Amino acid sequence: MIDEPKQIDSTMAKATRRTLVMEHITRRIRSRTYSAGTKLPSVRVLARRVGVSPSTVVEAYDVLAAEGVIFSRRGSGFFVSDRVQPFVVSQTGPQLEREIDPLWVARQSIDAEDSMEKPGCGWMPSDWMPLESLRRAMRNVARGNSNVLTDYSNAKGHAGLRQHVARMLGDQNIDVDPNTVLLTNSGSQALDLICRLLLKPGDTVLVDDPCYFNFQALLRAHQVALVSVPYTPNGPDLTMFESVLRKERPRLYLTNSALHNPTGATLSAATAHRVLSLAEAHDLLIVEDAIFAEFEPDLSPRLAALDGLDRVLTIGSFSKTLSASLRCGYIAARHSWIAALTDLQVAISFGGPSPMVTELLHAALTDGSYRKHMDALRAKLDRARARSIDELGTLEIKPFVNPKGGFYLWCELPDGREAAMLAREALKQGVVLAPGNVFSPTQSKNSFMRFNVSQMTGVTHKKLLRELMSATRPQ
């Protein structure tokens, strides 16, 4: 009788370990890492990999086989059954704390009530946007051609807006014909189309560490392997970049140019030239997201400009400068890729973005007020950035770099404080923060936080940050 509790504890522990093994397998089936017919690791291999006994793996396999998830072939092992499994994007990567899950952070920002303060979100307040220009454009579109209100888009999207994008890219030294510009339903869809065209499950894609969190989520949805290189104040770490190209042979490199998200760093000319030289040597394609380009006071190097759109595709949208509500992105690339991407978009969406949306955007971009709006916005952000750096400095929170423009500050918390813990506590009090590991493929940025200076005009988050920083001060 004395040993009975120990025996119960042992039985419960073994059941827990068996459940962990089952979850390990089912996550990989749902994410399509293990597809129908795939042979599962041997009992001994999986036992070593997961850190359990072989008997625990045998039990887990037997339960999964009884449920029809896998099946056995005598003398050959266990295989994934052909029963359809639901695809779950959130289970394609590491199962992390919800505070450091990029999909979770995106949902919290999008679903937050207007009254909540959101220093962790990725857009500016509505009263910072050109509301009168947008309202005027809406009135003009409503009175204009009725086909805009009822018809499908043409395959590549609004001709006038494509011409505007070509001129805009020309101002960034990227020589583009409007016929090699494709309008898409968003910047994210632009990347999704490129992934559908250029990647297949199992390919390797290189990203920065840290990088924009939705890059990770979208790439995992395409069932590719992610590798990363540290991002420095001048761009990717070139030694690591070359090493990864040699060892991992990635198909594609996905990065931000202009003002890097989340760091705010600016790619140097020397780094840009070296990246392109290495890309050519290792047959690497590059997708350059330049969504923050118009926030730069001075033009920085563009991979697409230096490359001439040979192995570089550039993407962007208008969600940061005009409206996140008017969903429209674009891709500029070599003609053959644009032709294939256009067909792909027709197959998926039956044409480009809404004619009503693109007509509105074109009107707002060309009514004569847009340049003044951007000049005023850059100046306003400069003031907000300086003020935020000073305010965060009183808490010993220091920026990685002092960005030349834009609205992000990538900051390190003092004394190794955990950003995820601060974000968890802040959310309980109605403030959305963006902890560093959201952006880190290697989960190595737990002492960092990304702040949006345009969303730091309230008082609640300032008081809360001070209280949280004081409460977590090392003893």
Image (spheres, rainbow, N blue to C red):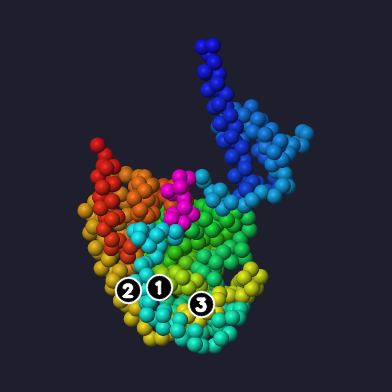
What amino acid does circle 3 point to? Val
Asked if 296 appears above or below 418 in the picture, the reply is: below
Write the start and end of the magenta stretch as one range: 96-108
- Residue 374 occupies quadrant: bottom left
Q: In the image, is 64 to the left or to the right of 150?
A: right
Residue annotated with mark 2: 377
Query: Does residue 180 appear left or right of residue 256 in this picture?
Result: right
Image spot of residue 117 (x, y percent): 34, 59
Residue 234 in view of the camera: no
Q: Residues within 10 Å of mark 3 (few under 14, many from 20)?
A: many
Dot 2: element? helix
Instruction: Using residue 118 as the reference point, say whether residue 251 is left or right of it.
Output: right
Amino acid type, label 2: Leu
Q: Residue at x 49, y 58 (%)?
A: 214
Picture residue at 52% right of the left edge, 18% below the top: 6
Marks 1 and 2 in Cβ contact (< 8 Å) = yes
Q: Earlier in the sequence, mark 3 or mark 1?
A: 1
Secondary structure of the residue carrying tag 3 is helix
Q: Which of marks 2 and 3 is nearer the N terminus?
A: 3
Q: Where is mark 3, residue-wise?
A: 357
Q: Is residue 320 visible?
A: yes
Above or below 310: residue 228 = above
- How many numbered circles does the render carry? 3
3D distance between C-alphas at marks 3 and 1: 15 Å
Q: Which residue in the structure is indicated by mark 1?
A: 321
Q: In this view, does 21 lie above or below 446?
A: above
